[in-house]
Amino acid sequence: MKTGVVLKRVGGFCHVLVDGQKYICRLRGRLKLEVDMILPGDRVRINPEQQTVEEILPRRVTLTRPPIANVDQVVIVSSLSQPAPDWLFLDRLLVLVAAAGLDSLICFNKLDLVDEPEDDLYARLGYRTFSTSATTGEGVGPLREALAGRTSCLAGSSGVGKSALLNCIIPGASLQVGSVSQRLQRGRHTTRSVELLPLPKGGLVADTPGFSRLSLNHVEPFSLGQCFPEMAALAEGCQFTGCLHHQEPNCAVKEALDREEVDARRYRSYLTLLQEIQRYQQRKY
Ligand SMILES: Nc1nc2c(ncn2[C@@H]2O[C@H](COP(=O)(O)OP(=O)(O)O)[C@@H](O)[C@H]2O)c(=O)[nH]1
Ligand SMILES: [Mg+2]
Ligand SMILES: [Zn+2]
C-alpha cells in the first residue's frame, strides 16, 4: 500500500501521484459509492499492483468552487496592464481567500507591459507579492519557489496570464493560452475538469477557471474587517467592540483614514463589500 494524492478524477478512475509516479486507479469495493466525493488534492492509499484506491484519507480543507481538497494557498493573479488592474476585484478575492482560511499570494503579471512597477501597497500591508512577466520570464523564479512543496490554486480574471505563468513554471505543461476575445468566443459554458499539476520542485498547482464563488454572502459584516489586515490591526482602538468602521463614533480606522494612514482606495473597497454584505443580510431577515 502506498499513499498518494489525487491529481484528477475521470469517471470512476483516479489519477494518483505517488512518489513522482502517476497511477490510474479504480476504486475498490464499497469505495465506488464514494467516487463522486473524491476531489483533486485528496490523499488516498492505493494498492500499486492492483491499481486500486483502497482508502480515502481525512481531508483538511475543502474548496467547492473550484472543487479542490487540501489547498494551502491561493495565488491571486492580476495583470498590470491589458487588462488594467481591477483593485476592487483583487480586494474581493483577498477577502474570499482569507474567509476560507487560506493564505494568499498576489502576483502582478505582464510586468513587460509597464514602465514603472506599481507602488506595492499590498506588500506594505503584509501580503506576499510577486511581479512577473510570463512573456520574458522576469520575476517568475521567486513565484516558482513560493509554490514549491505546497498545494496552490490560481485565481484571477480571464486574460491576466494564469495559464501562461504556469507554462513558464512547469516546463511541458502546455496549457492553453488565449487572448481575451478568443476566450469570449469560446463561450461561457465551456467546462473544464479541475486537475492538479505536479511542480518540478514538488508541490501541486491547479490552473482553475478561477474562484467562481465571488459573492461574499457567507461572510459576516464583522469578519470582513478582519480580512483587511490594516483595519484588523486598528480595530482594538475603536470605541465599540464589533465596530464596522463605517458610521460608528470614535473609530480608530476612520481616524487613521483621516491621517492618511489607511489607504483611501482600500477603505472604499471595504465599504463597497460591507454594503454588499449588509444588503444581503437585510434581504435575508
Ligand atoms: N505581454 C504579456 N502578455 C502576457 C503575459 N502573460 C500572459 N500574456 C498574454 O495574455 C493573454 C492571456 O493569457 P492566459 O494565460 O490565457 O490568461 P488566463 O486567462 O489568466 O489563463 C495571452 O494572449 C497571453 O499571451 C505577460 O506576462 N506579458
Ligand atoms: Mg487560462
Ligand atoms: Zn472602527
Image (cartoon, rainbow, N blue to C red):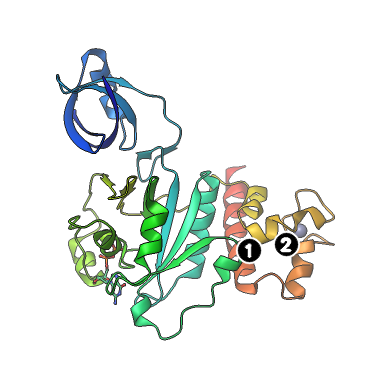
- Label of residue 246 in the image: 2
119 or 89, which is in the foreground?
Answer: 119
Percent from the top left, x then y, of residue 212?
Answer: 38, 52
Quadrant for the N terminus in the image: top left
70 left or right of 239? left
Q: Is residue 246 above or below residue 50?
A: below
Nearest to the observer: residue 3 or residue 264: 3
Q: Which residue is mark 1?
A: 271
* 175 shown above or below 260: above
Q: Residue furthest toward the top? A: 29
Q: CA distance from mark 1 to mark 2?
A: 7 Å
Sort mark 2 into few (<14), some (14-19) or many (20+) by Cα contacts within 10 Å. Answer: some
Q: Residue 111's quadrant in the figure?
A: bottom left
Residue 61 seen from this side: yes
- Image vertical order of residue 75 relative to residue 84, above or below: above
Quarter of the rendering containing residue 81: bottom left
Whether the residues at callouts 1 and 2 have beta carbons within 8 Å, the answer is yes
Mark 1 or mark 2: whose residue is earlier in sequence? 2
Q: How far across and how far down the image is residue 134, in percent?
A: 30, 69
Element under disc 1: helix
Q: Secondary structure at mark 2?
A: loop
Expressed as whole percent of the image width and height from the top left, the position of residue 214 reads 45, 53
- 128 to the left or right of 166: right
Q: Nearer the viewer, residue 82 or 124?
A: 124
Q: Can you tell me whether the CB of the residue at mark 2 lies under 8 Å from the nearest atom of ligand 3? A: yes
At x 45%, y 36%, the residue is 61
The kind of residue on which mark 1 rests is: Leu
Look at label 2 and name its amino acid: His
Observer able to see residue 155: no
Q: Quadrant of ligand 1?
A: bottom left
